[in-house]
């Protein structure tokens, strides 16, 4: 089988088918230099700290040095990244500055040069390996002709965006005893001024000089040994870098922080679980709030018009046994609107109160302007992990609508206030027999993005069709130890009944416009272009380009590795590029669905429209 | 008669002592294996700590370590498995659960009993 799917227009009814050591680059790397980069023989000057040891056997990346800086500062004339640039998002074709493309999370390029006609001629321009295993989930950032690409295990590469020449590189040295529930992912950097910022698996936030790769500051966000980690790209708002932590499988108390980009000092912290005496603590039985989870492990969005920050939260802990945390468990699985200067909450909307399925509320959000009943509405749209596509009024948090966007949703219906009416038979038990949908991977998962084409009013998401048995269990809380309370039993994956699709959803109505079907769950991010193309990838290793209006397959290229990355587009010297990473994490496939026999190994492919 | 009786008694005592010694050598897991409630507790603790996220539930190729095929990487005796669960495995993501489970060591032995009761030793 080719692994390439088919497009279905309209709604499908029913179940479907199947720190440390510095080396100098010897030559100044002018960006038009196409020659391979030579690197001096390493002469390590170890600055390893006591608790930063060499990588363990499972994550060994070799024993060479870990930091190669550029000899001459890179300067192609664009200058530092300004607030204006960040506000303009993707409106300049030459840049891709945010994880979400722009502050609103559209991941939509204004480039019309990448259209249904031209995309058929896409050719590989260059590629670059990461040298790491584990899921390669990056959304690269491009500025001043330089691409900043991260990999699993926190390698950071500065590459000539035109030809892939290596400009500088940093390999973060991880402790042996990382606490990772779900693999060694990193999804990218944030950029501002002359700084590039990366969060690390050992819960640090590090700022690099974008021109040289030298470290400007390095701040510990949390203690990784307690189960905290950073996997997402930070978001820059003004002089603040905002980043949230993962750790919902370890009974951590979730939070997201704002750091002064100039100093690395923390400006505020917003805990996602209230403390004693704070509003919402009454939604936790006993002292369960103390280990309540609600991690903030994805990137938020920002509404410049109202100066409002939007961040989302994940599951309460423990995941699959809610018996000791009776109540709604605020502010887990929620959309939060905040003042970015203070971190104070303006309002919240909780998608899945008292979650016992791991239906994190932190999938990709889009700040959309839509028309409902002839009236303009400013909204937040989200294809939630719980299988429903939500529209929430952006200034008040009022629920507008929720529609299922995957074929199989049976855990609950949603009432007129947006509260789930849960089917009690679908809750985890110690002897589960009910087939419950979606699976804990969700219809979509926060590990990958969607995209939004504002001209068409369509949201595009890669989706998972799978159901599970939810097994409740017993766990005790000890800091730094897994605290799950049960487990998902992947009955559909075992029976090979799982599949996936890229789905186009009308943001205003929630109606399904088209689906592109794939025999595996589709777990890669999305990119939209004004030319009318949607890019994504599948687990059989294909980069895919679909027609934005119909979902018809326009182009594909076998990159080889399972695609779990977030595609981007940019333009340099009048030429149009699309970048997509290839490389999955086979360990998780028996739980999530997908090939287990395709080797790990990240590799970025950059395609170009020939002139 | 008397001599024969004494001999018989000696044999009975010897067998009883051997049996007692054998029981004494049995691990708590082996004893729990015959206790359905203990086996179920082991299953629930396994599920609640790090079941599917750390150990795959299906024997298929690839993925996290599978615990039910008797292909032990760090020793397959009850005592060796107990040590692996209690102390973890250095340089891997297998953390040590010593002191982390609600009923302490008892829960570790019950997990082992659950694995023994569920395993597919000898099955290909």
Image: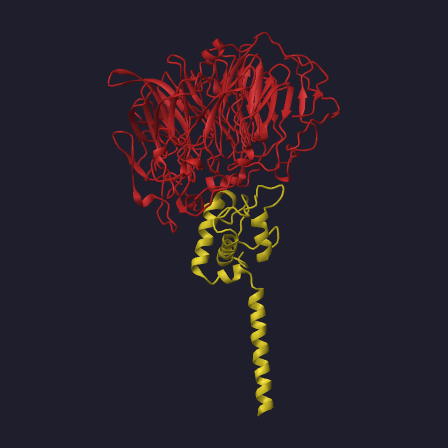
**Exactly how many numbered labels are in the figure?**
0
Residue A66 sits in quarter: top right
| Residue under the point 54% across and 19% down | A265
Q: Residue furthest front?
A: A277
Residue B4: percent from left, percent from top: 59, 89
Q: Closer to the camera, A107 or A330?
A: A330
Left or right of A507, for residue A91: right
Left or right of A368, for residue B88: right
Q: Which chain is red?
A: A
Residue A326: percent from left, percent from top: 35, 40
Left or right of B45, for residue A431: left
Residue B95: percent from left, percent from top: 56, 43
Q: Residue furthest bottom?
A: B1
Q: Look at the image and tell me in which quarter the C terminus of chain A lies.
A: top right
Q: Colour of chain B?
A: yellow
| Residue under the point 51% across and 38% down | A181
Residue A455: percent from left, percent from top: 36, 16
Residue A391 visible in the shown view:
yes
Residue A549 sits in quarter: top left
Q: Closer to the camera, A302 or A412?
A: A302
| Residue under the point 60% across and 85% down | B7
Relative to A95, is A230 above or below? below
Residue A489 visible in the shown view:
no
Q: How is the image coloured?
A: by chain
Q: Closer to the camera, A397 or A346?
A: A346
Q: Closer to the camera, A533 or A521?
A: A521
């Amino acid at each position: 089988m080719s692994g390439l799917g088919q497009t279905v227009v309209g709604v499908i009814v029913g179940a479907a088918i199947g720190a440390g050591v510095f080396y100098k680059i010897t030559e100044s790397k002018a960006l038009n230099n196409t020659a391979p980069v030579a690197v001096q023989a390493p002469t390590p000057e170890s600055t390893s700290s006591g608790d930063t040891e060499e990588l363990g056997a499972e994550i060994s990346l070799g024993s060479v040095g870990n930091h190669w800086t550029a000899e001459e500062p890179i300067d192609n004339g664009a200058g530092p990244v300004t607030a204006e640039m960040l506000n303009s998002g993707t409106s300049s074709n030459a840049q891709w500055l945010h994880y979400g493309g722009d502050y609103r999370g559209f991941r939509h390029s204004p480039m019309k040069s990448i259209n249904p006609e031209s995309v058929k001629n896409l050719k590989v321009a260059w590629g670059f390996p990461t040298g790491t295993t584990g899921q390669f989930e990056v959304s690269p950032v491009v500025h001043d002709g330089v691409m900043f690409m991260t990999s699993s295990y926190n390698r950071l590469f500065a590459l000539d965006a035109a030809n892939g020449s290596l400009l500088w590189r940093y390999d973060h040295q991880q402790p042996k005893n990382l606490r990772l529930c779900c693999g060694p992912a990193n999804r990218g950097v944030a950029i501002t001024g002359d700084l590039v910022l990366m969060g690390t698996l050992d819960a640090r936030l590090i700022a690099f000089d974008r021109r040289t790769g030298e470290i400007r500051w390095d701040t510990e966000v949390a203690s990784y040994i307690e189960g905290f980690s950073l996997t997402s790209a930070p978001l820059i708002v003004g002089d603040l870098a905002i980043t949230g932590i993962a750790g919902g499988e370890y009974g951590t108390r979730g939070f997201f922080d704002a750091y002064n980009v100039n100093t690395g000092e923390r400006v505020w912290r917003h805990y996602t679980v209230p403390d004693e005496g704070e509003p919402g603590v009454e939604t936790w039985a006993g002292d369960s709030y103390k280990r309540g989870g609600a991690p903030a492990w994805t990137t938020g969005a920002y509404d410049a018009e109202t100066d409002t920050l939007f961040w989302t939260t994940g599951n309460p802990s423990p995941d699959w046994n809610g018996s000791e945390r009776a109540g709604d468990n605020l502010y887990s699985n929620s959309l939060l609107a905040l003042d970015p200067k203070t971190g104070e909450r303006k309002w919240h909307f909780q998608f899945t109160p008292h979650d016992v399925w791991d239906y994190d509320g932190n999938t990709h959000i889009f700040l959309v302007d839509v028309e409902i009943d002839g009236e303009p509405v400013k909204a937040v749209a989200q294809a939630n992990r719980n299988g429903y596509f939500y529209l929430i009024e952006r200034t008040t948090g009022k629920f507008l609508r929720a529609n299922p966007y995957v074929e199989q949703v049976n855990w609950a219906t949603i009432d007129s206030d947006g509260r789930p009416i849960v089917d009690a038979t679908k809750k985890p038990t110690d002897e589960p027999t009910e087939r419950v949908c979606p699976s804990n991977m969700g219809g979509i998962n926060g590990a990958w993005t969607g995209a939004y084409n504002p001209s068409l009013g369509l949201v595009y998401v890669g989706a998972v069709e799978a159901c599970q048995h939810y097994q409740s269990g017993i766990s005790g809380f000890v800091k730094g130890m897994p605290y799950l309370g049960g487990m998902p039993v992947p009955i559909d994956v075992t029976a090979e009944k799982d599949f996936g699709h890229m789905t186009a959803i009308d943001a205003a109505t929630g109606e399904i416009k088209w689906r592109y079907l794939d025999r595996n769950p589709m777990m890669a991010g999305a990119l939209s272009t004004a030319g009318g193309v949607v890019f994504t990838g599948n687990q059989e290793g294909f980069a895919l380009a679909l027609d934005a209006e119909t979902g018809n397959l326009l182009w594909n290229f076998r990159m080889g590795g399972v695609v779990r990355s977030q595609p981007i587009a940019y333009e340099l010297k009048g030429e149009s590029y699309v970048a997509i990473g290839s490389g999955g994490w086979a360990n998780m496939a028996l739980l999530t669905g997908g090939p287990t026999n395709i080797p790990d190994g990240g590799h970025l492919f950059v395609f170009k429209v020939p002139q | 008669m008397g001599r024969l009786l004494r001999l018989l008694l000696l044999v009975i005592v010897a067998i009883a002592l051997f049996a007692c010694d054998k029981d004494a050598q049995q691990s708590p897991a082996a004893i729990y294996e015959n206790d359905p409630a203990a086996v179920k507790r082991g299953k629930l603790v396994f599920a609640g700590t790090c079941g599917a996220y750390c150990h795959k539930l299906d024997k298929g190729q690839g993925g996290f370590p599978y615990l039910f095929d008797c292909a032990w990487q760090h020793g397959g005796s009850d005592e060796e498995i107990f040590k692996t669960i209690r102390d973890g495995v250095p340089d891997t993501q297998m953390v040590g659960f010593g002191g982390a489970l609600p009923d302490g060591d008892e829960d570790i032995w019950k997990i082992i009993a659950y694995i023994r009761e569920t395993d597919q030793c000898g099955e290909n």
